Image (cartoon, rainbow, N blue to C red):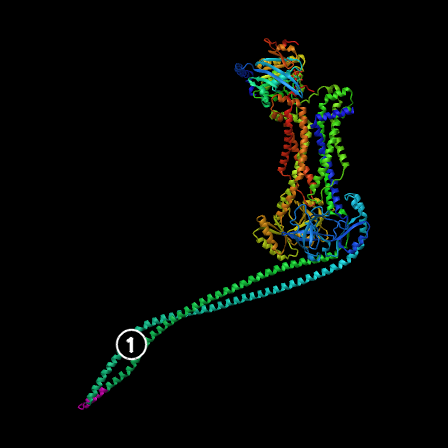
Amino acid sequence: MKKSQEFIPQVKKSEYNISDERAELMSAYIEFENVKKIYSMGEVKIAALAGVSFTIEKGEFVVIAGASGAGKSTILNILGGMDTCSEGNIYVDGTKISDFNAKELTTYRRYDIGFVFQFYNLVQNLTVKENVELATQICKNPLNIDETIEAVGLKERAGNFPAQLSGGEQQRVAIARALAKNPKLLLCDEPTGALDYATGKQILKLLQDTCKNHGVSVVVITHNLALTAMGDKVIKVRNGLIESIEINEHPLPVERIEY
Amino acid sequence: MGSALWKDTLREIKKTPGRFFSIMMIVAIGVAFFAGVKASIPDMKHTADQYFDDYHLMDLRVVSTFGLTKDDVSEIQKIDGIEGIFATHTIDVLTLVNSEQYVVKIHALPQNTDEQNMNYLNRVELVEGRLPQKSGECVIQETQMFELPIQVGDQLDLESGKQEALSESLEKNSYTVVGKVKTPYYLSSEIGSSEIGNGKIDFFMMIPQNEFKAEIFTEINLTVSEARAFNSYDDAYFEHVDHVKRAIENIAQDRSEIRFEEIKSEAQKQLDERKQEYDDGKQTFEKEMKTQENKLDTAKTEMILGRASLSANKDRYADQFASYRIQIEEGKQQLETLKATYERSEKTYEETKPQLMQQLDQLETQIADITKQLAENEEAIKDCEQQLKNPELTELERRLLEEKLSSLRQSKQIAETALPYLEPAKQALEVQLKQGEAGLKQTAKMIETQEQQLAIKEQELKDGEAKAQAEFKLGEEKLKNAETAYNEGKIVLEKARVSGQADLDKGKEQLDKAQKDLEEMAEPQWYVLDRHAHYSYMDYGSVADRMEGIAKVFPLFFFLVAALVCLTTMTRIVDEQRSNIGTMKALGYGKNAIASKFILYALIASVFGSLLGCCLGMTIFPTVIFNAWNLMYTLPSISFVSQSGLAISASLIVTMITVSATVAAVYKELTETPALLMRPKAPKAGKKIIMERITFLWKRMSFIQKVTARNLFRYKKRFLMTVIGISGCTALLVAGFGIQDSISSIVNKQYGEILKYDVSLQLKEDVKDSEQKELLKQLQADSRISAVTGITSESAVVYANDEEQTVTIVTADDTETLPQFISLHPRGSDEELPLGSDGVLISEKLSMNCKVKSGDTLEIDAGDGIKRKVTISGIVENYVGHYLYMAPSLYKEVFHIRPYDNTFVIKLSQLGSNEEQALGNDLMKQKSVSSVSFYSGIAASFSDTIASLSFVVVVLVIAAGLLAFIVLYNLTNVNISERLREIATIKVLGFYDLEVAQYVYRENILLTMIGSLCGLGLGIGLHRLIMNLAEMENVMFGRTIEPLSFLISFGITMLFGMIVNIVMYRKLKKIPMVESLKSVE
Ligand SMILES: Nc1ncnc2c1ncn2[C@@H]1O[C@H](COP(=O)(O)OP(=O)(O)OP(=O)(O)O)[C@@H](O)[C@H]1O
Ligand SMILES: [Mg+2]
């Protein structure tokens, strides 16, 4: 693992260099422009997103909140390249991903996106380390696996199978897996949904620290409005539309949030 | 609940068509194989029986060792229960087509070939042309395995192949082919063996009954009334026929005794005639020998005389020359003496000559003196006388004068007296001188003469000697020529004597044997044969029964795969329905009620699968199997017999299997508490596999390899199902291609590695030893032939362990060179087995058929009805026909007759059809050659048969493909559905479609490979089984499978795998990534 020496600093530097240049050229790091997602079920058309616009800056910690069925997951999926929008433009780091075809989207996911699922989605037949390895072996510039696992506090459990871990531990593995890819964007769909309060907090802390330390933009979906305090930006969604976008000048560290 | 259960089950089926289809199809295949292969046995027998019935195949056949008379026929006809009767003849003849000899069995067609004629038995099916209508017309067999080079319209010239002329038996000796026929009497090209030609009958021919001249019938065929109602492969049929059979046997004894006496006396008469012939021949031979010997003796005497006179002449000449030489020698001596005398005389002469000359001079001087004195005296006398006349003279004076005169006169007288003496002395002296000279001269002359004479003599001697030498040379040459001529004559005579004697011995032995045979002749024996003794009937029945073996193996395998497919599928369905089961349980449904949904699912799949399998399997498999066998047999197209029992039992068996598998799958879930069931099933926990313990190996594996290895060992049922299913697929392929390899390889092996000769030349029966030697010499001199040797090849019947086999006995005088022509080695070894006097070598298939091995004994009947024991000393590789090889010494010991070469086997210098044609024509011109066989033709005709076997391969490939598709489809289907979340997740992680496919398929491919490799081994066994079953009685198929076939089988299996993967790739691609977001069910 040669890359271990050049871990965080270098990556950071290069990332910033590029984004500095881009910042001049473009208005924002990520931009949703009137994005619509319409599901047609026979005659009926359901607009999961009815025209959504927002921006996310580099290294921003964004919280998306809203009621069930509001369209949060849809936004995240489209942003993560797992789904395509029906209308509108999406720019990520100066590239218009809304025009991407399936293959380009895959490449985009592969190199730019880290995904953390509500139900962890670890491969049961692989150990912790192997689950992380599964992600790193396909990307160009992965982080050191062992260090990443250590960073999520699972150094001792690296050889365990997911079934031998608690939910929180599993979610941390999932985060390590997403992080190790060294993505531009970390997307988390209710990462604490299946976890108890304390564990959920641990996870959120991990995400917040990651955002701060690695300069990765992090998008977290939550039901819990209390959590909005920790975001740099809070996007509220309702019935497929943006209800509000708030910039939080002083986001609170997770430890200080009670919910 | 009933309808709800149905609805629920049907919805489940609709939801999972792939799984339902997998179970249904594997059930269908299993049932198809099981019921299909099994059904083919009754179907084949039924078809054959129909054929027998339709063409009135005889139920019973009566033959006798001495033929049957008209009286016999009428006696039999009196028996009750006979429907049709046909007393007929058969005869084996030879015919030559394109210089190749064929042995033909001629049967008779009744005059009346009308459908209604119940006495028209063993009817024929006209394939081409028409039936014979007049004398000189015939129909021949429509052959199946190989094409006869005979067309309708061709004329066949027949030969008896025996001593007696064909005209004794048949009206004509040439028949025109007017049609080609098939008959249930012969279902295959195996017509039987014959005493003539090469011993194997090539095809049959049919001519009208009245073409046969013989009064004596060779056989009586008959049908039993109402026997057609039975299937002749059933016991009931034989029970029905048996009472007629026994009735005939009852009259047999009386009939044969009557015949015996007639025959014996006739035979003795014939034998006596032959003995007389032999004696005559012997006398002639001995007389001829004597004459030749006498001639030689005379020549020898003349030669001796000639030699004596030559040597006498030599002696005489030598004497003459010797005396001549002595004379010359004497002459030379005389000459020497003469020369010496001459020299001496010359010396004396030279010495005396001066003396004599001096004397002569003195004498002359004296004479001159005396003459002078005399003259002076005269003067003085005259003076005196004158004076005396003077008268004046005084007396004194006178007296004085007178006195003086007287003294003068006296002196004159003295002188005168002296003078005559002197003159002669002088003359004498002169003479003496002259004489001396003349003497010398004469001697010289004599020497000269003598020398001349000597020279002449020497020349004469030389000439004489030269002449004599020339004469001797001529004489000696003549003598030498005479001697060579004599010696050659002697050799020729010796050869003639040996070969003549051999011919005589042969004749004598034959006669002795014939006499002995006659003495030992058994009483005529009647044989009443039912279909158990009918070769085609038995052969085809056994072929059908052999399918039983396949019917045992295949289904077992397919049922196992079906069970595994069902188990994996149902396990998956049950897993998916977990919470459902839990809910139902919680609602108070009983175990049976819950399980019944799954059982119903399997049941429906099984019922439909069975239905499909029975419908397709019981038509396709019997048809394929029947048609495969019909490459060798000439049955009309298959007619099916309904076998509902089989269909039902096959369906029941397979249904039981699937239901059991379903119960096994659902059982565990049923025992769990509803609460547990309603919670998501803990995903099958990953665990370390054994391989991980082998750290050095594990470390070296790439990440992907590790993942694959883990997954591979994770699902044992699926592993088993796939490996077993795929191995079955590959095994079917290996067997299919192996069948082709094995059958095609035997041609090259038989006619390349074992029988290494290119041509075999059958000699005529009556060929003389000398002619044969002459022909051999001629063949050896032919530049187109690289090697040739003589062998004895004759057909015989061997008996061992109640088996009876027709074999070809091969013996070769020259056991040293035999391996150049026929390689006698055990299969799988290059070591040539020696032909010794301790035992015989037999071909492998013969040993298998007779169940004998090296060291056992066999009994041989070489056509004289006597069984002779021999020990087997080795078993040699051979594929076509049965052979028994023995050393000439052993042959003599066993048969009490020395083997006579009757075949020349030839290796050609160059191979090519033109050369062969030319050589064949040349060879056929030889009067001692009866037929020529080229082996290139045999190889070609065999290859055609193999090509037509390819549809068996096609069926096997299709079956293999189906098996592979079902198993792999099921595996992939279950795998994907179970790992939906995992797959969606890796998609989200950014795996490209191909990478996702690889991630999923790597195991499939590996499993396919493992299964395929296992299948290669399994295929060898399956192939062996099929080959054992398919083998004909006198052909041994190879057991070889070419490496290429393994490769192709492996390749095709992998290809099947790839096809399934490609099909499933679309499904894989369609998996939505949002699956990864769903909660665990
Ligand atoms: N595949 C689909 N077909 C039809 N409608 C869909 C599909 N996926 C989502 N929807 C609809 O789109 C809307 C938005 O769904 P989305 O999953 O984004 O909601 P959400 O905000 O994530 O809700 P929750 O908090 O419950 O996860 C919902 O009304 C849903 O019914
Ligand atoms: Mg959601």
Image vertical order of residue B896 relative to residue A49, above or below: below
The image position of residue B164, as x and y in percent, is 69, 57
Q: Quadrant of residue B160?
A: bottom right
Q: Quadrant of the C terminus of chain A?
A: top right
Specify the amino acid type for callout 1. Answer: Leu
Which residue range is magenta in the image?
Answer: B390-405
Answer whether residue A154 is visible to the viewer in this image. Answer: no
Residue in front for this viewpoint, B540 or B140:
B140
The image position of residue B507, as x and y in percent, is 68, 58
Q: Main secondary structure of the magenta part?
A: helix
Which quadrant contains ligand 2?
top right
Residue in front for this viewpoint, B151 or A135:
B151
For mark 1, give the secondary structure: helix
What is the count of numbered marks?
A: 1
Q: Quadrant of the N terminus of chain A?
A: top right
Answer whether residue B80 is visible to the viewer in this image. Answer: yes
- Dot 1: chain letter: B
Examine the structure image and report whether residue B39 is included in the region drawn in magenta.
Answer: no
Residue indicated by mark 1: B360
Residue at the outermost right position: B80
The image position of residue B670, as x and y in percent, is 75, 23
Residue in front for this viewpoint, B178 or B307:
B178
